[in-house]
């Protein structure tokens, strides 16, 4: 408990929305020290309603504990391919903490999902067609005002929410500089993080938290040790976080707009022109010319396809055709025979 009090000092003045958010921030500090010894670690997303609340400060304190300096930041971009290049460059540089700073769009990235749950990842070298296999050992963080995390990345994220409840949070006065304190007391902070985990292991790891798929060792050690010390679960309200996932809203709109019976991509392309509801739901698949993009299976590949349930409807996995048109489909939609799909593909 004394070690936990020391660990809490740099972030004591931050306006956490709930006790689970405070626990999540402490989990971030501990994880920054333990990350090299953990198989996997979730992403930590720090969000606030307005700028100047202290989002980057939380990540920088964790970076100081791990490296002695502030976090290396990645400039965010809604272009997923470009974001992949930026993340890959930092990963190749060996940065122990990657911070996607000041995200202003919905954050989505298949590469981030892989880096969070895989032991190794393939990264393309910039300016070359060569891929390099590197260990996925970086601690990944993201910050943003009202930050929203999309799809499968959502379940791989621990959220830390701040709210100063004032119009200009950047004008608040603090009794101490958190980064300066972290710099001066770095040895004590690192020792405090290790002491918390050593105490939990010495106690026999009692009352371990419920499993967190893909992050079992992190959950059994970092998350469970904080619960053992009487803190709230750093995962927070998981149901509320999943409900806020924009992927579910997108999937619900598409399911509602699509026909109930069998259909081909050609039929959907014809319906889009006459149905404002369908056109709005499939807006992401409308080309600049105004035509529905039915080629290359783009709509079927990019649709939400994680087997999630939405408003009583669920999408289930479907065996892909030879041209990989389908990944998964809502259960209420009847899939036509593969032979008919193959004919459609050649047209």
Image (spheres, rainbow, N blue to C red):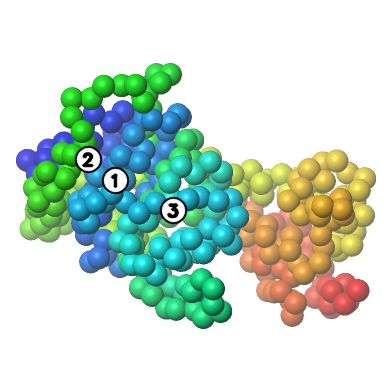
Circle 3/circle 1 CB separation < 8 Å: no
Label 2 secondary element = helix
Q: Report x, y in % for residue 162.
A: 37, 32
Q: Report x, y in % for residue 330.
A: 69, 57
Q: Quadrant of residue 3?
A: top left
Q: Which callout, 3 or 1, points at the residue further toward the start of the chain?
A: 1
Circle 2/circle 1 CB separation < 8 Å: yes
- Residue 219 visible in this rendered orientation of the protein: yes
Q: Residue at x 43, y 73 (%)?
A: 121
User: Can you identify the residue that label 3 sits on?
Assistant: 74
Task: Please tell me how crowded label 3 is: few (under 14), some (14-19), or many (20+) other residues with Cα within 10 Å.
Answer: some
In the image: residue 63, left or right of residue 3? right
Quarter holding the N terminus is top left
Q: Residue at x 30, y 39 (%)?
A: 57
Q: Residue at x 56, y 79 (%)?
A: 129
User: What mark, if any, has residue 175 been given in the picture?
Assistant: none
User: Can you identify the residue that label 1 sits on?
Assistant: 60
């Amino acid at each position: 408990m004394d070690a936990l009090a020391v660990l809490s000092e740099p972030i004591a003045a931050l306006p956490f929305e709930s006790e689970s958010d405070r626990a999540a921030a402490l989990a971030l500090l501990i994880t920054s020290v333990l990350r090299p010894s953990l198989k996997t670690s979730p992403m930590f997303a720090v969000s606030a309603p307005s700028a100047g609340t202290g989002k980057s400060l939380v990540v920088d304190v964790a970076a100081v504990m791990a490296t002695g300096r502030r976090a290396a930041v990645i400039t965010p971009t809604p272009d997923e391919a470009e974001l992949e290049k930026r993340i890959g460059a930092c990963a190749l540089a060996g940065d122990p903490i990657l911070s996607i700073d000041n995200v202003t769009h919905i954050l989505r990235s298949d590469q981030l999902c892989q880096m969070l749950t895989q032991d190794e990842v393939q990264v393309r070298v910039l300016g070359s067609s060569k891929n390099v296999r590197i260990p996925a050992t970086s601690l990944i963080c993201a910050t943003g005002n009202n930050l929203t995390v999309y799809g499968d990345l959502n379940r791989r994220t621990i959220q830390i929410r701040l709210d100063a409840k004032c119009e200009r949070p950047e004008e608040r006065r603090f009794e101490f500089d958190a980064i300066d304190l972290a710099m001066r007391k770095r040895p004590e902070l690192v020792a405090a993080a290790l002491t918390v985990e050593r105490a939990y292991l010495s106690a026999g790891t009692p009352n371990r938290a419920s499993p967190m798929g893909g992050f079992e060792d992190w959950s059994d050690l970092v998350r469970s040790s904080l619960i053992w010390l009487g803190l709230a679960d750093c995962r927070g309200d998981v149901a509320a976080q999943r409900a806020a996932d924009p992927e579910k809203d997108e999937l619900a709109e598409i399911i509602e707009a699509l026909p109930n019976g069998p259909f081909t991509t050609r039929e959907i392309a014809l319906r889009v022109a006459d149905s404002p509801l369908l056109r709005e739901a499939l807006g992401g698949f409308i080309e600049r010319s105004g035509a529905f993009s039915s080629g290359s299976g783009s709509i079927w590949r990019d649709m939400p396809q994680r087997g999630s349930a939405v408003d009583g409807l669920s999408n289930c996995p479907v065996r892909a055709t030879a041209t990989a048109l389908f990944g998964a489909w809502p259960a209420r939609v009847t899939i036509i025979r593969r032979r008919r799909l193959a004919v459609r593909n050649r047209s």
